[in-house]
Image: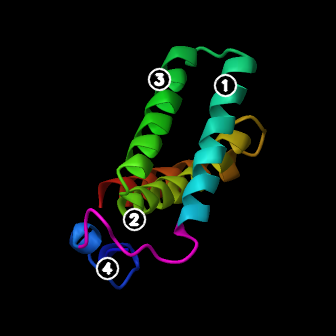
Amino acid sequence: MPKALGGSGDFVHVYDLMPYPDHVPYLKHYYISVFSYHLGQMAMHVFGKHENDYIEMGFHHLVTIYLMVGSYMMNEWEGGAVISFLHDAADISVMFAKVFSQTTYDKASIFWFFSMILSWGWCRNV
């Protein structure tokens, strides 16, 4: 992870040993687990209730699966794992914001909304 995101490394060194990097232990398990989650989200999206954003979210899920399969097949697991981790870390507050937006707890909803904006902005833009 880069230093700006709490790590001790630099993202520039992700591709130093390409095309045959020495993967850290259990990276393949993490990558396949994250891929399985996104594949399950795609299945739930297709077979679940269709919302107003059905096409946009379907495209989002397809692009995510395409990028994960592509980076896995090109042996670029480290870069894909860092990006997946950062996106998933920001999605925690997104899910809480969605939950509390459907309740009568306005203060919690406002808190998680601003938490979502901050974490999403930090994790995806820094």
What is the spatial separation of the Cα atoms under label 2 and label 1, in whole angstroms? 28 Å
Q: Disc 1, disc 4: CB below 8 Å?
A: no
What is the spatial separation of the Cα atoms under label 4 and label 2, in whole angstroms? 16 Å
Q: Secondary structure at mark 2?
A: helix
What is the spatial separation of the Cα atoms under label 1 and label 3, in whole angstroms? 11 Å
What is the spatial separation of the Cα atoms under label 2 and label 3, in whole angstroms? 24 Å
Tell which circle, 1 or 3, labels the residue nearer the N-terminal end.
1
Q: Residue at position x 29%, y 69% from top?
A: 14
On screen, residue 27 above or below 96: below
Which residue in the protein does label 3 denote? 59
Residue farthest toward the bottom in the current orientation of the protein:
8
Badge 3: residue crowd in 10 Å (few <14, some 14–19, many ≥20): few
Badge 2: residue crowd in 10 Å (few <14, some 14–19, many ≥20): many
Q: Nearer the viewer, residue 122 or 63?
A: 63
Q: Say whether residue 126 is left or right of residue 29.
A: left
The image quarter in which residue 44 lies: top right
